Image (tube, helix red, strand yellow):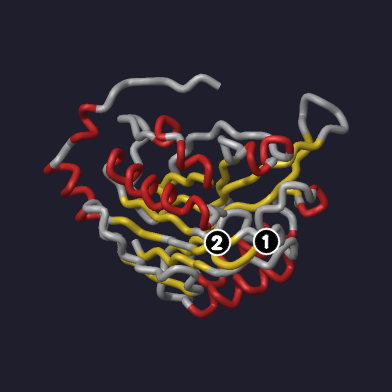
Amino acid sequence: MRIALLQYPVVWADPQANVGLLNERLAAIAGKADIAVVPEMFSTGFCTDRPDLAEPWGGGTCQALQRMADEYDMAVMGSMIVKEQRDDVQHTTELRNRGFLFAPHTQPRFIDKRHLYKHGGEDAFFSSGNQREVWEYRGVKIRLAICYDLRFPVWLRQDKGNMYDILVVVGCWPTARIKYWDTLLQARGAENHCYTVGVNLVGIDGLQIAYCGHSAAYDTWLNDLAGFADYEEGTRIVNLPMEKLWHFREVLPQWKDGDEYSIES
């Protein structure tokens, strides 16, 4: 599985500009990757006080993502702000930090961020999700997590009925706390016996918060295959051979010893 990690600055609160920039980046790697991964809230930056930036699921940004997936024959993963009407309460709209997978010529799949970052005001802005879905794409099972979700190992823990091959994490993770990002990405890969891909942004956002990147792709031995420098803008394409992962699980079948558990909403 060839995965492109797109580490770059996000234009603050400008979905049209960000969709255009993503199109340019995907066009440059067409035919070279199976999946392209972009940072959390790729179309706006981490705006938690701008409900006007939220789009309906299936709106203009979604349509653009589907067109790009179809045209360039690669899936796109990331997250964005969406709004949806609640079925049980009239005239009530909920906002979501929605993670997505747009694959070529198929219906998009999504999950909503489970753990909302109170320190950044996210819990007052978004409603949380509870989907623990594993998506299969081109024969590979993938789990998506969004930024703060990375800190909660039980939420991301594989169980025997919910196995995945690649954990993809999209983030807006500031420089001030980047060591946690580095450590937790490796920890989730080690405990779940999977490849781990994390994509973060770089630059200074509209709130003057700095992001140094540290996007990474860890193999089963926790080697970083991407090798980004601090604050580097660019794209890395890594190949994650599934046969190597599956062999690793046969040689060290630690997943068979995992505890049975359930998560309460």
What mark, if any, has residue 200 been given in the picture? none
Residue lying at 65% horizontally and 44% vertically, measured from the top left: 120
Specify whether 230 is left or right of 17: left
Amino acid under disc 2? Tyr
Specify whether 178 is left or right of 12: left
Contact, mark 2 vs mark 1 (Cβ under 8 Å)? no
Query: Circle 1: is it few (<14), some (14-19), or many (20+) Cα within 10 Å?
Result: few
Query: Circle 2: is it few (<14), some (14-19), or many (20+) Cα within 10 Å?
Result: many
The residue pinned by badge 1 equals 208
What mark, if any, has residue 211 been given in the picture? 2
With respect to residue 155, does 71 lie above or below? below
With respect to residue 161, does 220 lie above or below? below
Q: Nearer the viewer, residue 107 or 27?
A: 27
Tally the numbered discs: 2
Label 2 residue SS: strand
* Residue 17, horizontal then vertical, whole percent: 71, 71
With respect to residue 160, does 143 lie above or below? below
Residue lying at 52% horizontally and 47% vertically, measured from the top left: 147
Q: Residue furthest bottom?
A: 28
